[in-house]
Image (spheres, grey):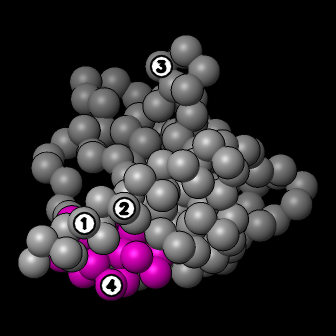
Amino acid sequence: KQAQALKAYRALVYSQGWGSSINSDPTTLMRYVLALSRSGGRWDEAVAVFDRAQLQASGGIGMTLVDGAFDARRPDWSGMKAAAHYVLGTRSPRHGPADPAEQLRHLESAAHAQPNWSAAQFAFGQALEKAGRTGEAKTALNRAAAHASAEMRQQIQVALKDLNSKDKMR
């Protein structure tokens, strides 16, 4: 079924004239990246699709989905999968509503694939808090703080204080 999935994604992503933005939606592109990673697809194709998602998301103004880029000559499937899961966990698709449970699963996958990536840990912690899983949220936020820049560490400390104050109110 992986071969069928890849064929369907290729047809969707590389089609012209659909009159829809689904084939350029970063969430569609990241799902394609994950399909490539599961099937042992071509690394260079995954990098090209990832770069296309970054470009589509930036709208030409230089904003990116995630910091950093991947080198087409140096495969890093773990990093690529983590980045794709992070995007799918933090962005709403253009077509249809976001599913919070699915987003939480994607953020969990990103956090487990790259445990030292503070942004993934932070987003995972926030999603856990929204799901009412405050103990796990604190753990994820503390992991994020251990690897965060000073600026991000301040955001994390605010989030942890907020969680602690909510716990005291219960």
Question: Helix, strand, or loop for circle 3?
Answer: loop
Inter-mark Cα distance, 2 to 4 = 13 Å
| Mark 2 neighbour density, 10 Å: few (under 14) some (14–19) many (20 or more) | few
Among the 4 quarters of the image, the one containing residue 76 = bottom right
Residue placed at 74% from the left, 45% from the top? 69
Q: Where is mark 3, residue-wise?
A: 59
Identified by mark 4, the residue type is Gly
Identified by mark 2, the residue type is Lys
Note whether 145 is above or below 97 in the view shown.
Answer: below
Note whether 56 is above or below 101 in the view shown.
Answer: above
How many labels, in total? 4
Inter-mark Cα distance, 3 to 4 = 38 Å
Q: Where is mark 2, residue-wise?
A: 161
Q: Where is mark 1, residue-wise?
A: 165
Q: Where is mark 4, residue-wise?
A: 135
Sequence-first tag of 3 and 4: 3
Say which mark, if any, is on residue 37: none
Extent of the magenta region: 125-140
Sequence-first tag of 2 and 3: 3
Identified by mark 1, the residue type is Ser
Sequence-first tag of 2 and 4: 4
| Mark 1 neighbour density, 10 Å: few (under 14) some (14–19) many (20 or more) | few
**In the shown orientation, is residue 49 left or right of residue 95?**
right
Question: Helix, strand, or loop for circle 1?
Answer: helix
| Quadrant for the C terminus in the image | bottom left
